[in-house]
Amino acid sequence: MVKKNSLIISEKKKNTGSLEFQITSFTKKIRALVPHFELHKEDYSSQRGLRKILEKRRRLLFYLKKKDLLRYQKLISKLDIRESTNQ
């Protein structure tokens, strides 16, 4: 699973503004924060930051899905994330 994320990032090093790179980096941040909350359940400021990152990623995924469905499907399968049922 870690190799998939690093592959996308290494492929996109030249274009850090690409949707795939941004979504992948947000996913890495999310996965790094989740174990933190197992130890620190009452860290509300970090929970707020996590919610902000989740919302940014959700908006980017919605935009990508609307613009290019094939790229969206490839990305969510590479990152092993669920497809959003909202919107």
Image (tube, rainbow, N blue to C red):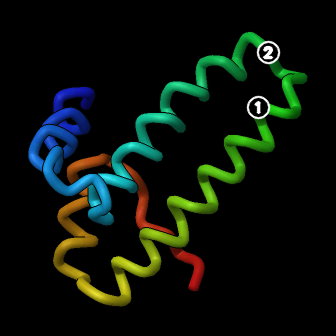
Amino acid type for the residue under numbered disc 2: His
Q: How many labels does the image show?
A: 2
Residue assigned mark 2: 40
The residue located at (42%, 66%) in the rendering is 83
Q: In this view, does 24 lie to the left or right of 14?
A: right
Q: Can residue 71 be seen in this view?
A: yes
Residue at 37 percent across and 54 percent down: it is 22
**Mark 1 Cα shell of 10 Å, populated few (<14), some (14-19), many (≥20):** some
SS at mark 1 in the image:
helix
Q: Quadrant of residue 48?
A: top right
> Where is residue 47 drawn, in percent x and y?
78, 37
Relative side of 59 to 7, left or right: right
- Res 55 label: none
- Residue at image position (31%, 47%) is 80
Q: Which of marks 2 and 1 is in front?
A: 1
> Picture coordinates of residue 19 (x, y %)?
32, 65
State if disc 1 and disc 2 touch (CB < 8 Å).
yes
- Residue type indicated by callout 1: Ser
Q: In which quarter of the image is the C terminus?
A: bottom right
SS of the residue under disc 2: loop
Residue 76 showing in the rendered view: no
Q: Please name the residue that numbered disc 1 is placed on.
A: 46
Residue 36 screen position, x and y as percent: 66, 18
Q: Label 2 neighbourhood size at 10 Å, few (<14), some (14-19), many (20+)?
A: few
**The quarter of the displayed image where residue 69 is located:** bottom left
Q: Looking at the image, is mark 2 or mark 1 earlier in the sequence?
A: 2
- Above or below, 54 against 33 in this view is below
